[in-house]
Every structure is written in structure tokens, then in C-alpha cells.
Image (spheres, rainbow, N blue to C red):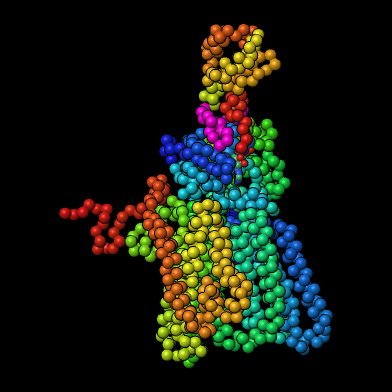
Amino acid sequence: MTSNPPNRPLIEVRGLHRYFGKTKAVQDMSFKVFPGEVFGYIGPNGAGKTTSMRILATLDEPTYGNAFVDGFSVVDDPDRVRRRLGFMPDYFGAYQNVNVYEYLDFFARSYGLRGAQRTGAIHYVMDFTQLDKLADKPIDGLSKGMKQRLCLGRTMIHDPAVLILDEPAAGLDPRARIELREMIALLAKNGKAVLISSHILTELAEICDRVGIIEQGKLLAVGSVDEISGRAETISKVQVRVLDGTERLITWLTARDDIADIVQKDRGVAFTHEGGPPKQAELLKQLVQAEFAVVDFASKTKSLEDVFLHVTEGRVQ
Amino acid sequence: MSTADANTTEAERPTQATSNWRNWLEVLEHRVVGLLEWANPILVKETRQALKSKQFLLTFAIVLVACWIVSFAGRAIIGPQIFYIASGQDMLVAYYAILAFPLAVIVPFSAFRSLSAEKEDNTYDLLSITTLSSQQVITGKLGSAILQILIYFSVVSPCIAFTFLLRGVDAVSVALLLGVTLLASIGMSLIGLLAGTMASVRYTQMLLSVGLVLGMAFAFFGAVGVTPELLRESHKMIQDRDFWIGLGGVLTLYLTTFGLLHTAAAAQISFPSENRSTRIRYWMLLQQACFVAWMTVPPLLYPDEPEAVPVLACAAVGIGLIYWYVMGSIMTGEWPHLSRRVQRSLPSSLVGRSLFSWLNPGPASGYVFAVANSGALVALGLITLWANAPFPPFGLSATQISQFMLLGWCYLIIFLGLGRLLVSVLRRVAFVPLAAAFLVHLILMMAAIGVPAVIYSMSSQFRSSGYSLLLATNPFWTLSEVLESGLVSGREMLVYLLPAAAIVTFLLNLRAIGAELSRHRIAAPARVYEEEEELHPHPEPSPTSPWEEDPREPAKV
Ligand SMILES: Nc1ncnc2c1ncn2[C@@H]1O[C@H](COP(=O)(O)OP(=O)(O)OP(=O)(O)O)[C@@H](O)[C@H]1O
Ligand SMILES: [Mg+2]
């Protein structure tokens, strides 16, 4: 099922929109994920991560636009999409009176696996997620981390080429997190395309080949972690103190394109500046030329976290 | 196990019989496991769950205990006479009540709950993105309901066998009673499932569950209430040929309705771009065909009563018109928009388009479908009527009956057409789902009946004069007037008025019909063909008959 040419994206989102009444949960989103790639979704609460993932998983329909899994439209060919897609939602769906083995067995059967193929898949998955010792345990009694593993196991039971994981690391302890990261890296190595969402940036930074920053349903920035970190290097937090004329300084700064997030602090003005050190030197020179009595000029390069805060604005719909 | 067999020692040889027996068991086990492999996954899972579920074991135990209590109490009450009087019937009714409760209430209601429980436990999403089709989901859920029904049967059937020993009960009646109960319970479970697919919001879920519980309680008390009488009459009934023929008719109705409801339930939970309509329309066609076929049976049975035939035709057309009105008011609420997926399989030839376009989803095609089918029924009714014209039916003239049929059809065309127009206008300003569209039809009908009724109740002059043209919007009153006294004294104009209104309504709908008819098939995306090629490679061309040339060889010149 993974016999697709390397240039064809396994996930392609094209101009996707999803409105709930007046709420624009997803707006004009487009990106591609290729085989063997892990794509990270970062965004604040209510950004539209779950909504767009549910559309990809054929659980919801776009208002406009389309999305494709291995070349098949999620709107027109959901049956073909489902065969090659595993979706792990941010909740765990548990059946009562079912143990780990039976749970996996049920989903394996539901994906049409029969006989030795099915038992083989169940054992492979239990081995992969290290659940083999818990086969007979009722799933109601599993711990959060164990449930999360079982959920991942269920997602990959039919060996899908595309995995969509909605906050898989939520609620996991540091060790389980590292293990999950290893599992995902292994899946990507086996040629699967993985779309993963998280609030925790450092976590994504380590496993994602590319990340997309999303807020209010819009994809604000897409790129490899290095590209975005590179952007982090050019963005710095600057703090300036002048002897007098702070008001005039703020007006002067506001007029410039390369400056944002201006805040007046007790003894000066703080803002973010984009452009890297040479441009900063330029800025300082211009400040002096504009006859500001600069007594303090401090700058600090931003972390990925700061970039996130800079790119998104924390608006909630 | 195979290693154990290989190590059989000399000492174990003589037990040839046991090893045969064991082999046979092994084969059986193999078969059962093989069968389970292909069994519906939901059925397998829910059986496993039921075996571990406390609630199920509890109900099971209660039924068992109730059977014991009835047995001992019955024995005690009847006392030593038990071997002399025909007490079997009373005992049977008591056991039947015990059986009917889980079958009429518990199983159908848990079928209703099973889909919403999946939604509450967050498993529904996980289930719906598997490769199971929506039909398989419904069949699996129904399968586990049937399994429960069979288990309850197996608890109570030994007790019922016990009533044979008490005399007063014959095997055929009991088998019939149980058979009908079994089918009814399966049917009710299916209705429960269908209701479960409709209950998406808490509010509708509550309404539906109240309705269902009322219906099930009615079925339970009804079944238990009529059973004693039925058992008393049954020995006469089962000797009556017409009873069995009637049963055949009911069974046909049951089976076709079952298919229709199963398809409808599956359509409810299928993906929105799926074709949810065409299969249901096929079932309607089948149901109509079966109905017409069964209507020919009474005249064949009673060839010496030809004057009953026109009356039968009249009744059949009346039932058919109501059927198509109800179905039509559902179909005309469908969405005019066709998904690309459905457009891929539209009929493409001219003949195909003119014949099969009416089976495509869409409100206008549904309108034409209902109008055409009811029209066919009316035409058949008219032919039957005129073929039997020499026999004057009970006090009715052939004109009255034909007017009844034709005007009834006009009413159907008018009401469905106006309702469809109303829905399409409403859809420009608001979101009107299927259920709301159905409601629009209902309100339209109620207004047509209610408004003249209000005017009547306000004016004493109208009240005293009986039927007048003002009531022309009330189809039921008008049609019964046609049958009772005919259209006389100034009401003859209805014969022209109603068809004219029907034609105008149909013409008003023509634009929408044209729009739906002009939809063309679109090609599936290349990727779909690519996968089809991968999954089902074309067989290499080879000669299909010995005298054909082999296409693989280059043609000889
Ligand atoms: N079924 C729905 N009906 C109405 N609004 C919805 C629905 N689902 C999502 N929304 C809205 O869409 C927006 C995006 O929600 P979504 O769940 O996709 O966010 P998210 O990025 O997954 O957030 P989180 O990080 O909290 O999981 C929110 O404003 C939410 O209120
Ligand atoms: Mg979310």
C-alpha cells in the first residue's frame, strides 16, 4: 500500500476551509506531507488543529477546499482514504468489558484483516507498543500512558501509510514521551507520513522534519525546524531606554515595518525586531540620528517558543 | 495438538473410536473458527462483551428465575388436576409473557441505545473510520440483537416444551406464535437501530426514546393481551387456507419493509458524499411490485365474486397513494446538490438517463419518482376497474371509483409539488434538513385540512350545508365525498379544477426537474482508475471460444 512514487505527497491539503456557523475554525489551509516525513502542527487552543485533522480522517467535511490522502480526496473517496489512514484522536474510545487483545482484535477485523494476517498484525502492534504483557488486561483498568499506547496500536493495526496523531503525548510522563518519540521516528523511517499536533514545541522540534504554526485556522508559517529556528535568530527582543521622549520613541517605532510587539516598560520600551544583528546596529544608528538620547540598548535572540508567541497572537475566536 | 497426535503410542492405539471422535471435534472447531473469521466484527465483539457484562447476566438470571417461579406456582395452583385438565394454555401465556418482555422491550431498546452509546463512549468515530461499510455496522448491531433474542428463546423454550405435556396446546400454534414473536422482535430491533441513527442531538434522542418505549410497551401488552384469545382460536385459524395466504402477504410486507429500513438505517450513518437514496428507491419499487402482485391474489381465490374487484382496486390505490405521499414527502426533502462521488455513477446513455434518472438522489427526481409510481398504480387500478366494469360494485359507480383514483393522484401531485417548492424556497434562507422538510409537508397538509375546518366552525351557514367547494383543499373529505355521493350539484368542476391545479404544480416544478435531469456523469479521478488497475488488473485477453482468434497473436494478413 506504500507503493507510491516518492514525489507524490501522502497528505495534501488544498485551500481547506471549515466554518461552524460564524466560527472560522479552518481558513485557507494548504500544505503537503511526503512519505517518511513527520509534520508537526503547533498552535494555541482553538487554533483548528483537531478540526483539520478530523477532516483528513474523514470524520468531518470541509466547507470549501479539499484534502487528499495518497492522492484520494477525503470528500469523494473516503473509503479509499480510510484503508490507508490511521487516526489517533485526542480522546480514548474505550469499550466496556473488553481486554487489550480483544480491543485490537476488533479493530483488526473491522479493517478486514483475516486469519494469520490478523493475529500477526495484533502481535506486531502489541510488541511495538510494548503491550504484550497486558493482553488480558481489561482496558477500563489501563493507566493513561497505557491507554495512549493502545490508542497508537489501534491506529497502526492495519499498517496505514498515513498516521494522524492528535496530541499523542498529552498526559505522558517524560520516559513515555521519549518512547513515543522513538516509536514515531521508527514509523517515519518505515516510509509513513505522520501528521502530529502538540502544544509542546520542544517535543515537536525533536521529531518533526517540518512544522506548521497555526492560529485561528490559518497556517502562519511552514518550514523545517531549522528554518523556523533560523527565523528565531533573526528575531530578537530589544529593550531601549532613552533619557526623555519615550512617547515620541513609541510613535517613531510604530511607524517601522521591522518592529512589532511594542510595550512600554517602567524604564523604557521593549519590542521585537526582525532582521538580525547588522540590522540592529543600523536601528541603533538611526535612533541616535533621530536625536533620541539612548542610554540603554539590550537585545536577546528569541527561542522557538518566542517565535511561536511572536507569530501567533494568542487570539481566541 | 498436532504434536500430541504424532506422539501417539502403541498403548493408545485401541481407542480408535475416541480418536475419531476427537478428529471430528477438531474439524468442527476448525470450521467454527473459520466461520468466526468471516463473521461480522461487531457481532464477535459484542458477543464477547455480553458474555462478560453484568447487566446481561442479570437479565438472563431474572428470566430464568421467573420461569422457575411460574413453573412451581403453576404446579401449585393447578394442583393434582394438572394431569387431567387442559391447563397448558394458561401456563403457555405466562411463559410467553416472560419471553415477550425482553424481546419486545429490552432487546429493541438496547439496539436503539447501542449506537448512541458508541457516540457517548467516543468509539463511534473510531468505528466509522474503519473499512466496515455502514451496512455491515447495521447488520452487526442487528446480529448481536438477534443473538440476544435467541438466548432468551433458549431459556424459555424448555418451559414451553413443558406446556405440551399439559395438553390444550398444539405444536403448530405455538411454533407460529414463537415464529411471529421472533420476527417481530427482530423488526423492532431494526426500528430501534434506525431511531438510534437519527438521534444525533440529546433532544431528539430523548423524544425518540420516549416514543420507542411507548411503542414497545404497546407491543408487549398487545402481544400478551391477544395471545390467550389467539391460542383459543388458533386451531380453527390454522385450518383456514386464507389464514396462511394472508400470513404470506404479511410476511412479504415484513421482508420488504425490513430491507427498506435496513437500507435507510445504513444510509443514515454513511458518509455524506455517499449515495444515500438510490438503494432505498429500489426497495420502494420492489415493495410496490410485491403489493401489486399480492393484490391479484384475492380475485384469484374468489373468482365468483367479481363485483369485489373494483372495490379492492379502489382500496389498493388509496393505500398506494398514502404510501407514495409519505415516501414522496421524505424524498422531496433530499438535497438538490449531488456529490462528485454520486455524479461518477450517473446513467450516461440517453435511454439510461430517461429511465434511471428518477432513481438518483434529489428532491425533484424524488418528486417525479413518487408521481410516476403512484401514477402507474392508478393506471393499473383504472385498467382493473374498466376490465371489471360490467359488474356493478356495491352501490358505487365506475365513474365514482375512477374519479376517486384520478383525483387522489392529482392531490398527491399538488401536495408533494407545493411542499417541494416550499422547501426549496425555505432552503434559500435557512438550513432545512430532511426531517424539517418532512415537517413542512406535514404542516402544509394540516393547513389544507385545518383552514377550511376553522372557517366551517365559525360560520353556521357552512356547517349546515355539509360539503362545499371550500373543502376542496381537504383531500380526505373530498375523496370520501366522491365515493359517498359523487361530485354533483356544482362540484363537478373539481374534475377540471384539481387536474388543472396538478398540471400547474407540476409545471412549476419543471425547472428543478430539468436541472436535476441535466446532471451529467463525471469521470472518476485518475488516481481511482490507477488503484482499480492495481487491485483488479485486467485479465489478459484470451479467446472466449475455440473458433475465435487468439487476440494475443498478431493478426494474420
Ligand atoms: N463541532 C463544532 N461546532 C462548533 N464549533 C467548533 C466545533 N469543533 C470545533 N469548533 C471550533 O473550531 C475552533 C477550532 O477548534 P479545534 O478543536 O480544531 O482547535 P484545536 O487547535 O484542536 O485546539 P486544542 O489545542 O484546544 O485542542 C474552535 O474555536 C472551536 O470552538
Ligand atoms: Mg485539539
Q: Which residues are magenta?
A: A201-224
The spot of residue B271 in percent (x, y) is: 52, 53
Front-most of residues A106 and A59 = A59
Quadrant of residue B434 in the image?
bottom right
Q: Determine whether A293 is above or below B59 in the image.
A: above
Q: Determine whether A132 is above or below A237 in the image.
A: below
Q: Where's the C terminus of chain B, which quadrant? A: bottom left
Residue furthest left in the image: B557
User: For the point 74% across and 81% down, which residue is it?
Assistant: B90
User: For the point 29% across and 59% down, which residue is it?
Assistant: B543
Locate residue A4 relative to residue A99 in the image: left or right.
Answer: left
Q: How many marks?
A: 0
The reply to whether residue B456 is in sight is yes
Front-most of residues B481 and B21 = B481
Locate residue B487 relative to residue A309 in the image: left or right.
Answer: left
Q: Where's the N terminus of chain B, which quadrant? A: bottom right
Which quadrant of the frame does ligand 1 lie within?
Answer: top right
Q: Is residue A223 in the magenta section? A: yes
